[in-house]
Image (tube, grey):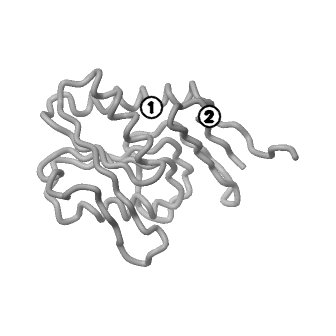
Amino acid sequence: MTDSRLLILNRAQIQQKIDRIAYQLLEDNFDEDEIVIAGILPQGSNIALRLKSILEKIANFKITFINIELDKQASQLDFKLDTSIEVCKNKVVILVDDVLNSGKTLAYGFGVFLDVPLKKLRTVVLVDRNHKNFPVTTDYSGIALSTLLKEHVDVVLTETGEGDAVYLG
């Protein structure tokens, strides 16, 4: 059986994109004492943890990490956090996901923070597909792809990083 998927990013390219985004986050927040990186489970959290690891080496600010679990099929906001939302109060929050397609997931991600006073909210995605149905944009993206609606972007991230890839299929 042949693989009909097209390799868009390999392991090294993914790492380069995440490194670049980490430095952009540092530049945007160099004067902060603390930022919160909020990863949308599952893949957004994997990217967020990698960003946190890089930032811990290059930044002087404290980095707090939280996981957001969203019910993406729900017609209204339904989420769970692994820590109190109060850790975000009056801080910079970086919302991270793997792919921006319709914008629904990021829109729900914004909803998590609606009742919390924040300094600013920034968004990060590895792949921006440019098919937004919701008025959502990203502040930082690894790559922007113009794709067909029927095509699927598959982000594969492994714990060791050995099998990391982004495919279009």
- Give the distance between the C-alpha atoms of the residues marked 2 and 1, in whole angstroms: 16 Å
- Looking at numbered disc 1 in the image, what kind of residue is underneath it? Ile
**Does residue 142 appear to the left or right of 78 in the view shown?**
right
Q: Residue 35 appears at what percent x and percent y?
A: 21, 40
Q: Quadrant of residue 148?
A: bottom right
Circle 2 or circle 1, nearest the eye: 2
Which residue sits at x=16%, y=60%?
116
Which of the marked residues, 2 or 1, is nearer the chain's N terminus? 1
**Does residue 73 appear to the left or right of 168 in the view shown?**
left
Disc 2 secondary structure class = loop
Q: Residue 107 appears at what percent x and percent y?
A: 38, 62
Q: Residue 152 appears at what percent x and percent y?
A: 66, 54
- Is 135 drawn above or below residue 122 in the view shown? below
- Looking at numbered disc 2 in the image, what kind of residue is underneath it? Gly
- Label 1: how many residues lie within 10 Å, few (<14), some (14-19) or many (20+)? many
Residue corresponding to mark 1: 18
Q: Which mark is residue 132?
A: none
Which residue sits at x=62%, y=30%?
10
Disc 1 secondary structure class = helix
List the single residue furthest toward the bottom.
Answer: 75
Cβ–Cβ under 8 Å for marks 2 and 1: no
- Label 2: how many residues lie within 10 Å, few (<14), some (14-19) or many (20+)? few
- Is 59 drawn above or below residue 94 in the view shown? above
Between 27 and 108, the one nearer to me in the picture: 108
Residue corresponding to mark 2: 163
Q: Residue 38 appears at what percent x and percent y?
A: 31, 49
Between 56 and 142, the one nearer to me in the picture: 56
